Amino acid sequence: MLVMAVLLMAGTTFLTISSTESQIALNQRAAAQAFLLAEAAIHKAIVQLNANSAYTGEAGTTLSGGTFTVDVQPTTAGCTSTSARILNATALVSVAGGQAQALVQATADRVSYPYRWAAFAAVPNLVVLDGRIEKELWLEDYSSVDSFDSTLGSYSTTTNKGAAGNIGANGDITLDNNAQVSGSVRAGDALHKGSGVTITGSQTDSLSPSSTSPGEPFPSVTPSTAPTTGLTVTSGTYTLAAGTYYYTTMTFSDGTSLATSGGIVTIYVTGAVSIGGNVTLGGHPDTQLRIIAKSDGSSTEFTSFTAGNNFTFYGSLYGKNTNINIGTDSRIYGSMVGRTVHLDDRGAIHYDQAMSNQEICHGGKFNIRRGSWREVIAN
């Protein structure tokens, strides 16, 4: 009888443990299901917002064995208070003894982060211009690319120099003799290298790209205000206070400069930009100048950004439909994204890593803003 009592007690204990373990497993499955349901609710809200920007959410929607509620609120984060939204999704899944609940919050915005490159040529491969084939991204003899972080101070070869100077193109990349890239190189078509070329990072190319290859996407950007006049600087230093400016063209004569004061200066230019020799645009301690050249229209509606020798630029230049041509012995502290990018002999691009999260607002679709996820799971 004693042995039977012990065995009965052991059996009861094992049954209890087994039942508890089964319940734990069910709770974990329900919690995972609830979290996935909340994520699905966020993505459904994105679809709804893109169909109707007045969408404010929904409650008690049934999906995949549970229910979810989405609350959509405006926020001043991102581009503007009218374009960004805070999405709060709550999902419930029934489980024995209660419910599994998951809360997910995300920020949806109409922004893009194009400055992840020291230089990038957005045009597809093999573009014919005036009977000749353009070179999409072209670094001439003894040119160089590396990186720095403006939040740590000015560029320095000893204390503030890095190897994140990544360059790319949706078409060809040509690196002439003795060009140096402290970073990775990604060509959508062919990578051409002269003698003495040094690349510290990875090298990728596609010698037979498909016409349907997605490549690196870049948003089209149209100024919210149509410019009516150009900016011409013939002497001295022209200073712009923090704000947004709209110009049809920009012209800087030899030896002139553009300075910024009091914060970020954003300049939209719809036409050609002509910069003379020995011109400086922007300045340290950090890159406060953003130039958005022509970035809308069809691929045949392009313009140009041309700078002479000894050009110095502190900031970001974005021109999806702009051919960028930089003269000999120039120095770029920031990032350049264009239709094509050409850096002449002995030029240098020092990619500013502080620009990796710099936004461009455009009237495109809502997307999840990077780094905005927060999750709480409760049983």
Image (cartoon, rainbow, N blue to C red):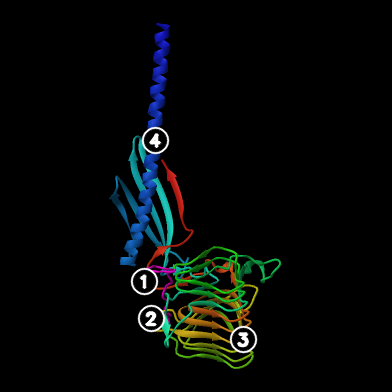
Which one is in front in this view, the residue at disc 4 or the one at disc 1? Answer: 1
Q: Position of residue 302 (x, y in %)?
A: 43, 84
The prevailing secondary structure element of the residues shown in magenta is: loop
Residue linked to disc 2:
297
The kind of residue tagged 1 is Ser
State the CA–CA distance, disc 1 to disc 3: 36 Å
Which one is in front in this view, the residue at disc 1 or the one at disc 3? Answer: 1
Q: Position of residue 198 (x, y in %)?
A: 61, 69
Q: Is residue 264 visible?
A: no
Q: Is residue 152 visible?
A: yes
State the CA–CA distance, disc 2 to disc 3: 30 Å
Q: Which mark is residue 25?
A: 4
Front residue of 329 and 24: 329
State the CA–CA distance, disc 4 to disc 3: 68 Å
State the CA–CA distance, disc 4 to disc 1: 49 Å
State the CA–CA distance, disc 2 to disc 1: 20 Å
Residue linked to disc 1:
211
Q: Residues within 10 Å of mark 2 (few under 14, many from 20)?
A: few
State the CA–CA distance, disc 4 to disc 2: 55 Å
Q: Residues within 10 Å of mark 1 (few under 14, many from 20)?
A: few
Which one is in front in this view, the residue at disc 4 or the one at disc 3? Answer: 3
Q: Residue at x 42, y 52 (%)?
A: 104
Residue lying at the far bottom in this picture: please name it: 234
Please state if 191 lies on the left or on the right of 73 as rendered.
right
Residue linked to disc 3:
309
Whether residues under marks 1 and 3 lie with C-beta atoms below 8 angstroms apart, the answer is no
